[in-house]
Amino acid sequence: MAESILTLDQLSVGYTEEPVVVDFSIAIPAGSITTIIGPNGAGKSTLLRAIYGLNRHFGGTVRFRGQAIERLPPKERLRLGIGFVPQGRCNFPLMTVRENLELGAFTLRGKAAEQVIERILAQFPLLQAKLGIMAGNLSGGEQQILETAMVLEASPQLLLLDEPSLGLSPANQDQIFETIARLRDDGLTVLVVEQNAHGALQISDTGIVMELGRLFMVGPAAAVASDPRIKVAYLGGT
Ligand SMILES: Nc1ncnc2c1ncn2[C@@H]1O[C@H](COP(=O)(O)OP(=O)(O)OP(=O)(O)O)[C@@H](O)[C@H]1O
Ligand SMILES: [Mg+2]
């Protein structure tokens, strides 16, 4: 198995008095796709946000490529190679696709920024055709891809995605899952929280089920998808 790029050990995180996610331990292999599923309020978004440094740390460690990062602010984690695409889409709907991509490359200057935008457009040809369109006029799936593209401009090695297919048509959901699989094939490690358990587990190497802030199940995605309890709860089985 590939070396672990992200290792959580006994991680407890939350917001105010009590941790929401408790004693969470997992090792994510480099170059894999891992999907987290679980009921509403289980703490999936809290866990993902905590990996990016957006939540209160109560205990435990987050190691990224061997380095303890649980005390680092988000911008440091981004610099180390962690990208986070939060739930919801299109931060700048009244700006064009090109302007959004320029914003995503704002830390780079002149030629470097142009090169990054060219790389991203080669990776996402559909954005090339929409450069002059206001981002708010893109379809939901296209907006989600634009948001992901903006985060990828920072060249992360680990991409955290929170509900990328939420609210999208089935065709757009497929497009998002195809994009995620392609990014993994290009060497990226992806950790994704998804309500479409079926679609997400299909492209994943590993499945994680969270319940009440804790790890309920972890295993190969196919094994999680075929577990009778998971089928009934998340996959419309009987
Ligand atoms: N900003 C916040 N302040 C305090 N509590 C919060 C905050 N955000 C979330 N919580 C609480 O943390 C718990 C877990 O929420 P979280 O958003 O992580 O769940 P989730 O698994 O992502 O759910 P969903 O599937 O609905 O997105 C919930 O009880 C929620 O009320
Ligand atoms: Mg959530």
Image: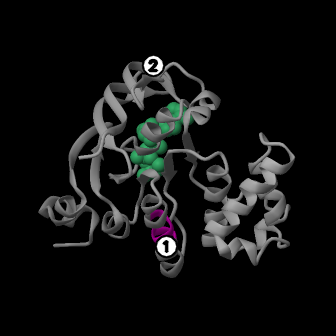
Q: Quadrant of residue 144?
A: bottom right
Residue 32 among those drawn in magenta: no
Q: Residue at x 48, y 33 (%)?
A: 50
Q: On the rendered structure, is 238 left or right of 138?
A: left
Residue 137 in sight: yes
Q: Give the residue furthest to the bottom.
A: 171
**Can you say whether 105 is above or below 226 in the image?**
above
Q: Quadrant of residue 234?
A: bottom left
Q: Amino acid at mark 1?
A: Gln
Q: Residue at x 74, y 58 (%)?
A: 117
Q: Residue at x 49, y 57 (%)?
A: 163
Q: Earlier in the sequence, mark 2 or mark 1?
A: 2
Single out the mark in the foreground, 2 or 1.
1
Q: Secondary structure at mark 2?
A: loop
**Can you say whether 47 is above or below 228 in the image?**
above
Q: What secondary structure is the magenta-colored segment mainly? A: helix
Closer to the camera in the image, 1 or 26: 1
* Residue 169 percent location from the top left of the image: 53, 78
Q: Quadrant of residue 74?
A: top right
The residue at label 1 has a CB less than 8 Å from ligand 1:
no
Residue 178 among those drawn in magenta: yes
Q: Which residue is mark 2?
A: 17
* Residue 202 percent location from the top left of the image: 31, 68
Part of the protein shown in magenta: 176-180
Within 10 Å of disc 2 (Cα), the crowding (few <14, some 14-19, many 20+) is: few
Residue 139 in sight: no
Q: On the rendered structure, is 187 left or right of 139?
A: left
* Residue 28 percent location from the top left of the image: 33, 42
Q: On the rendered structure, is 161 left or right of 214?
A: right
**What is the number of the mark on residue 173?**
1
Q: CA distance from mark 2 to mark 1?
A: 37 Å
* Residue 112 percent location from the top left of the image: 78, 48
